[in-house]
Amino acid sequence: MLGKMMDRQLTLDLILERGGRYFPEKEIVWRAESGVHRYAYADFFRRTKQLANALKKLGVEAGERVATFCWNHAQHLELYFAIPITGAVLHTVNLRLFAEQIVYIFNHAEDRILFLDRSLFPLLAPLLGQLPRLKTIVLTGEGETPPAPAGKALLDYEALIQDQPAVYDYPALEERTALGLCYTSGTTGEPKGVLYSHRSTVIHSLAACLPAVVNLAETDSVLPAVPMFHANAWGLPYSCVLVGAKLVFPGRQLDPASLIELMASEEVTFSAGVPTIWAGILQLLDQKPGQLPRLKRMGLGGSAPPRSLFEGFRERHGIEVFQGWGMTETSPAGTHGHVKSSLPQSGPAHYDIRTSQGIPAPLVEVKGLDEQGKEIPWDGKTMGHLVVRGPWIASGYFNNPSASEALLTPDGWMRTGDMITINAHGYIKITDRAKDLIKSGGEWISSVDMENTLMGHPKVAEAAVIAVPDPKWQERPLAVIVPKKDHSVTAAELRDYLLARMAKWQVPDRFEFMTEIPKTSVGKFDKKVLRAKLT
C-alpha cells in the first residue's frame, strides 16, 4: 500500500524560490579587487532568473554541461542556481589542477559555454587552442576585457543578463535530473566526474542545516573559505539560500589576515575550510585575541587537523571547532564530529572525540570492511576499508564505465579508499588513505596519526609523513616538517617528542625540513609530490 502524499519533485527551484521570496532583505557579500560589495537576496533572485533566460537565449539545452572557471563571488552563486534550473548541468572546473587535467576535464565534459573570471583569463588562455568544443566564453568579475580568442565568441556577463526578463518559467524537471558535475582531483589516473542530481542536492542541503551536521539558520552569517569550484563549496551556498543565512564570499583572498578582517566586519558566525587556513588564523588570534567576537563555530575538512587546533580555538577563544569527513563523491557531507551529550564535554576524552571524524550524517550509512569483506567490530582498534551509502552518495562516474564499476561493492556500497576504525560509540577515525598506510616489519603505521602528533609540537606548523622503501623493514616512515615562523626545531627534538607518545618502532628514522609542504588543489598534503622528491 502506498501513502497518500503529494509527489512534488525535489528540484533546485524549491530552494531558489524560498530564499528569494521569504528572505529578500538578507545580504550576499563578496570581496573583489575594487573592495567589498553587497546586494540583497531580492537582487540575487531577480538576477538569477535573468541569467536563466539569457542561457535559454544562448541555446543551452537540457543535459548540456555549462562550465564555470571562477572564484567565490555573487555571479558564481547566480550560476550555481541559474544553470541547473534550466535543466542544464553546472560544471565547476577546479582552477588549481594541472593544465593537462584541466584540458582533459573540459573535453571530457564537452563544454560548449564557459563562464570565466577575467582575472583567470591569463591562466586559461594558453589552453584554449586545445578545447575545440568550447565556442562561447562569458567573462565575469572585474578587470580589463581581453581580445576574443581565435574561434571563440567573447561576451560580458552583465551585458548578457541586463535586458533579460526577471520572470522565468521553470521547466518541469524530474528530480533525478543531473544538476552539477564536479571532477575529482585525479590523484590516481585521470580525474573522474561526479554527477549530482537535483534530488541529491536538495536532500543534502536540508541535512546540512541540521544541528547534527552544520547547524545553519537564518540568523547566521556564513563565510565559505572553501572554493566554489570544488565539491559545491561543501554545499554551503545551497544550504544558506535554503535557510536565508547571510552569505559572505572572500573572493580570491584566503590568507589568514584578510579572512579575519572580512569575518570581523561582516560579523561571521560560522565558517568552514581546510585545517591549513585555520592554523594560520589561530596564530593571529593568539597574538591578538578578541578579533572575532561573533564567530562561534568552525567546520574543518579535507585533512585531519591536529588536536592543538581544537584545543586552541575552544580554550583560548571560545570557538567550537568540529571536523567532518567527505569526498567529491559524497556531495560532500559524510560524517561530522559533534560530541554526543552522553560523552565527556571537556578534558582529554572530549578532544579524543573531537579529533575523530565523527558519526555519519543523518541518512548516510557507513561501515568498515576487513580484507575478507566482513564488517569490522566497533572496538576502536580494528582497521577496515570505509564504505558508505546514502541518497547523496555517488553510484558511478560520468561517462566512465570502468571507474563506475570499480566504485561500488557487489551489494551497492561505495568504496572510499579510506582506512578507518570505529569505536564503541560509533565514531569513525580515518587512520589513513589505503595507499598512504605504512607497513613496517609487518605492522601498520598510520601517517595521519603521526602527522597530528607532530603538529601538536609547539614549534611545528605542518607535518606530512610518507613511506620510504627500506631493505630490512619493507617500509619506514619519513616525516616532512615545516617549523612555525620564527622557530627552529631539530630532528632530535622531534624524535624525543614522538618517543613519549608512540612506540619506538613507529618513530621515523628520517626527518626532512621544508619552508612549505606541497598541497593538492583542495589543500591536502600532496604526498605523490613528496614521494617523487624524497624517495
Image (cartoon, grey):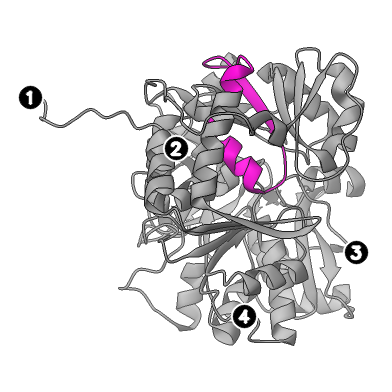
Indicate which disc, 2 or 4, sits on the residue closer to the N terminus: 2
Q: Position of residue 449 (x, y in %)?
A: 63, 62
> In whole angstroms, how far apart are the C-alphas of marks 2 and 1?
28 Å
> In whole angstroms, how far apart are the C-alphas of marks 3 and 4?
23 Å
Left or right of residue 345: residue 509: right
Tell me what residue is drawn at x 77 percent, y 16 percent.
135
At label 2, which amino acid type do we have? Thr
Q: Which mark is residue 312?
A: 4
Are there few (<14), some (14-19), or many (20+) residues within 10 Å of tag 1?
Answer: few
Indicate which disc, 2 or 1, sits on the residue closer to the N terminus: 1
Instruction: Give the magenta part as a residue range.
Output: 55-82
Say what secondary structure mark 3 lies in: loop
Q: Quadrant of residue 490?
A: bottom right
Q: Which residue is mark 3?
A: 515
Q: Is residue 180 visible?
A: no
Q: Disc 2 or disc 4, which is closer to the eye?
A: 2
Q: Disc 1 or disc 3, which is closer to the eye?
A: 1
> In whole angstroms, how far apart are the C-alphas of marks 4 and 1?
55 Å
> In whole angstroms, how far apart are the C-alphas of marks 3 and 2?
40 Å
Indicate which disc, 4 or 1, sits on the residue closer to the N terminus: 1
